[in-house]
């Protein structure tokens, strides 16, 4: 036994093996995350092709009107999409799970289908549905109510309508699935005892389902916040490029893309990236403290 | 009481019928459009008006005629999806095994790193990553798309969870039988991970197949671009772009729909894996 062990090379020892296992992660983490973040912070203080240090000059972009608009757009999109995508799928999940519901699995599958499509296919369809032609679907639809053809994608209000439609269409089914998974973990005797106590359907929903779905709702909130703040492709598809009229649909990532990749101003682009990173860290800190307090409540 | 339940049942059914109709409407529009010439779509807009007598599969014939780049994009996407899915399944399972089955110095810190990567949207480091990929001469290579995301933190998390449910005696038994540390992984653990591979494979395959922003940045040669990027490039209504765009969009969804119908359980498990963190 002893001899065998010695013969086995260093790399086969039980002490070294775990590091060999996690090595692929350590390499990609060091190269693609740590190095990139360091180089981004560095570039944000430089004039990039020349790599001359310019101090905080790149950060003057925070006063730029388009930057402010794109940040505001991203925040607005995030808030409204959270307001839509947390309660609506929850209610749908609760209704779908009720005893009287027929053909549960069929509806569940149908609602999930949009999640299979890429943002490109979704974008193509919605761009054409919200087309300016009088014959495009949305114009025909509002025509039923006597409203005239609209230039949907060139008017600020209706641009948002189209963006939220895409978001809801693609993610309602997935979020509903998260909630369904949560609901199915709630022990059924909780409902039985609530019924014995004379609780109505609505009371059961508010006092049993809702509190127990809090962890799921927080998870959905988290992915909605990050998805919302990082939104770019939906807007890119809807406007066929990173070029919405008067920047009505330019997002934070869209602005970063424009600075860094379209105008080749990597210094300014990196400054935007650093600001984005700080926002993400801020959201995470809020999130972690929230989770912490929830953890404590559970222990009581 | 019984009547009440019946009314409720009908009302619920109608509500979900409406929701399902709205869900399927955009795809139905796309399919109807694929049965008429693109020029008509350009003139009249996307809607359900169709003269069923003249409905035809000409757009699909054009798609399959080989006079366009569609299938080379399809092939590129297929290739990248297969390589990326296989590689990231293997490497993420490899890493997860290290985290799940061993005690070692720095384990907690390294796992915090995994969580950190999970909590930062990849768009944040878009620019430095692009610069790095240029520096590594991986622009216009599928490795430029794949390498930065080859270890997927979500999958490491999921696999680690799955592996910690397996009895550790399995590993000790393997050691007694004379397996090396790596032999245990290949001979004992990998076969046991098959069910979790199905769910995660679909998760990764879907995100790779549908990925848009990063492949658009890494690849700029028309013959090397992926399917989503290629479809996006057809959005300007010149020539017969719209014919290929519409039929091509349909044809990009159909294989996934077929897979979905066959392997629904794994699709749903994979796509909603994130929430089973507990």
Image (cartoon, helix red, strand yellow):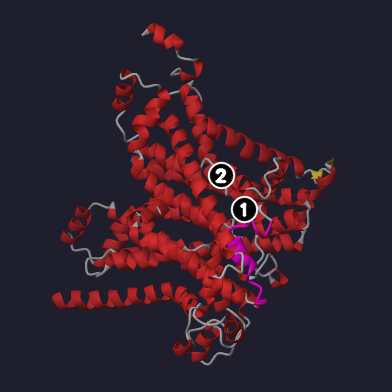
Locate the N terminus of chain A and report the quarter of the image it occupies: top left
| Residue depicted at x 48% and y 88% | B54
Q: Chain of mark 2?
A: B
Label 2 crowd bin: few (<14), some (14–19), many (20+), radius 10 Å: some
* Element marked by disc 1: helix
The residue identified by callout 2 is: B149
Describe residue A233's horizontal placement relative to residue A200 as left or right.
right
Q: Give the image location of residue B16, x and y in percent.
A: 33, 73
Name the residue rendered at 61%, 56% in the picture. B213
Q: Measuring from the top left, give residue A226's x and y in whole percent.
A: 54, 53
Pointers 2 and 1 in contact (CB under 8 A)?
A: yes
Prevalent SS, magenta region:
loop
Question: Which disc number belongs to residue A265?
Answer: none
Relative horizontal placement of residue A203, taking residue A57 as reference (left or right): left
Q: Nearer the viewer, residue A61 or B233?
A: B233
As drawn, the residue found furthest toward the bottom would be A146
Which mark, by number, is residue B214? Answer: 1
Q: What is the total number of numbered labels drawn onto the structure image?
A: 2
Q: Secondary structure at mark 2?
A: helix
Residue B257 sits inside the magenta stretch: no
Q: Where is B66 relative to A55, above or below?
A: below
How far from the left and from the top, in percent, is residue B44?
Answer: 58, 87
- Range shown magenta: B221-239
- Residue B236 belongs to the span the image colors magenta: yes
Extreme-top residue of the structure: A3
Viewer-proximal residue among A42 and A236: A236
């Amino acid at each position: 036994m002893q001899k065998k062990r010695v013969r086995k090379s260093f790399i086969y020892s039980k002490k070294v093996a775990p590091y060999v296992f996690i090595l692929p992660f350590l390499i990609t983490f060091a190269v693609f995350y740590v190095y990139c973040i360091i180089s981004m912070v560095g570039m944000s203080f430089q004039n990039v092709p020349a790599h001359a240090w310019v101090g905080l000059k790149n950060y003057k972009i925070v006063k730029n009107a388009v930057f402010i608009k794109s940040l505001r757009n991203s925040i607005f999109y995030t808030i409204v999409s959270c307001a839509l995508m947390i309660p609506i799928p929850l209610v749908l999940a609760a209704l779908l799970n009720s005893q009287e519901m027929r053909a549960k699995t069929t509806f569940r599958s149908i609602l999930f289908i949009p999640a299979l499509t890429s943002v490109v296919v979704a974008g193509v369809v919605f761009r054409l549905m919200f087309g300016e032609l009088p014959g495009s679907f949305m114009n025909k639809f509002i025509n039923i109510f006597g409203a005239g053809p609209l230039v949907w994608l060139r008017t600020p209000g209706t641009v948002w309508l189209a963006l939220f439609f895409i978001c809801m269409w693609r993610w309602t089914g997935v979020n509903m699935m998260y909630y369904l998974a949560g609901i199915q973990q709630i022990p059924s005797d909780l409902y039985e005892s609530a019924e014995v106590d004379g609780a109505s359907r609505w009371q059961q929903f508010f006092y049993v389902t809702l509190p127990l779905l809090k962890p799921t709702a927080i998870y959905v909130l988290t992915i909605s916040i990050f998805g919302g703040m990082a939104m770019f492709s939906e807007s890119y598809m809807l406007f066929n490029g990173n070029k919405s009229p008067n920047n009505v649909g330019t997002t934070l990532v869209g602005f970063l893309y424009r600075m860094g990749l379209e105008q080749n101003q990597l210094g300014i682009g990196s400054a935007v990236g650093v600001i984005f990173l700080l926002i993400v860290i801020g959201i995470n800190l809020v999130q972690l403290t929230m989770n912490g307090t929830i953890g404590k409540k559970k222990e009581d | 009481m019984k009547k009440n339940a019946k009314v409720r049942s009908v009302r619920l059914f109608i509500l979900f019928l409406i929701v399902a109709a709205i869900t399927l409407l955009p795809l139905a529009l796309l399919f109807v459009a694929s049965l008429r010439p693109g020029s008509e779509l350009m003139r009249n807009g996307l809607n359900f008006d169709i003269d069923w007598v003249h409905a035809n599969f000409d757009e699909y014939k054009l798609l399959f005629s080989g006079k366009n780049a569609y299938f080379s994009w399809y092939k590129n996407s297929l290739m990248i999806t297969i390589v990326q899915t296989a590689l990231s399944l293997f490497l993420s399972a490899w890493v997860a095994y290290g985290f799940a089955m061993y005690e070692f110095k720095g384990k907690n810190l390294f796992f915090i790193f995994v969580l950190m990567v999970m909590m930062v949207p990849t768009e944040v480091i878009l620019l430095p990553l692009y610069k790095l990929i240029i520096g590594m001469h991986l622009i216009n290579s599928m490795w430029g798309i794949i390498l930065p995301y080859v270890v997927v933190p979500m999958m490491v998390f999921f696999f680690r969870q799955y592996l910690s449910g397996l009895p550790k005696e399995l590993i000790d038994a393997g050691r007694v039988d004379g397996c090396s540390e790596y032999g245990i992984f290949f001979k004992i653990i990998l076969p046991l991970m098959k069910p979790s591979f199905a769910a995660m494979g679909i998760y990764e395959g879907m995100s790779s197949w549908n990925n848009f922003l990063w492949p658009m940045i890494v690849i700029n040669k028309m013959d090397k671009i992926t399917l989503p990027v290629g479809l996006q490039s057809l959005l300007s209504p010149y020539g017969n772009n719209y014919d290929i765009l519409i039929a091509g969009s349909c044809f990009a969804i159909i294989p996934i729909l077929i897979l979905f119908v066959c392997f629904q359980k794994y699709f749903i498990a994979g796509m909603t894996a994130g929430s089973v963190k507990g």
